[in-house]
Image: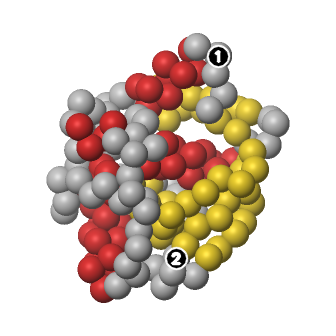
Amino acid sequence: MLAIATYGERILGQAAQPVQLFDEPLAALAEKMLDTMKLAQGVGIAAPQVGQGIRLFIMASHPNDRYPDAPLMAPQVVINPQILQRSGKMLTGEEGCLSLPGERVQILRHESIEVRYQDLSGEWQQEWLQGFVARIFQHEYDHLEGLTLVERLEIQNQGADA
């Protein structure tokens, strides 16, 4: 299991750099991240959370103790993600974070988003995500921008829609 950075560690406040090499070390990192996320009972994990300042995260929604109503999806490796469009409708939902153990907060997120990202082979993918999976994507995307739930909550409380 990789060590998970906790709130206050510098890397969590920094914007991640684009991935340029789609090679075996990248695939190995993604596999270790997936194993770490599963052991921590998460549904997503971003590279900065494991000390890597690159634009990579894993989404793997599944019912577990932390999210008993989560939908089941195959693990998805997301590299160099972009959010192309956001729905006007926003929903509040409870979120936790592996970097903020034991904390749960209500976060306002877009109900659906259109996204574009690269997979492990460097191929571009594009899709609309909705509901809980869209929430995971937005949460992990925040990590790549140097935002944790603490900063997202501050933005939300200021009335900004970033």
Q: Amino acid at mark 1?
A: Gly
| Image quadrant in which the C terminus is located | top right
Question: Which residue: 41% across, 68% down?
Answer: 19
Quadrant holding the N terminus: bottom left
Name the residue that disc number 1 marks. 159
N-terminal-most mark, 2 or 1: 2
Q: Which residue is mark 2?
A: 119
Q: Name which residue lies at 33% across and 36% down.
A: 13
Give the residue furthest to the right.
Answer: 88
Q: Position of residue 151 (x, y in %)?
A: 44, 26
Which quadrant of the view contains residue 72?
Answer: bottom right
Density class for disc 1 (Cα within 10 Å; few <14, some 14-19, many ≥20) is few
Cα distance in 3D space between marks 2 and 1:
34 Å
Q: Secondary structure at mark 1?
A: loop
- Residue 134 shows up from this direction: yes
Q: Secondary structure at mark 2?
A: loop
**Where residue 112 appears, x then y in whole percent?**
74, 48
Using residue 20 as the reference point, say whether residue 39 is left or right of it: left
Q: Is residue 6 left or right of residue 159?
A: left
In this rendering, is residue 76 above or below 138? below
Q: Are dots 2 and 1 in contact, CB under 8 Å?
A: no
Q: Is residue 36 left or right of residue 105?
A: left
User: Which amino acid, by three-letter code, is at mark 2?
Assistant: Asp
Q: Is 1 placed above or below 67 here?
A: below
Examine the image and state in which quarter residue 35 appears.
Answer: bottom left
- Residue 63 shown left or right of residue 127 in the figure: left
Counting labels gives 2
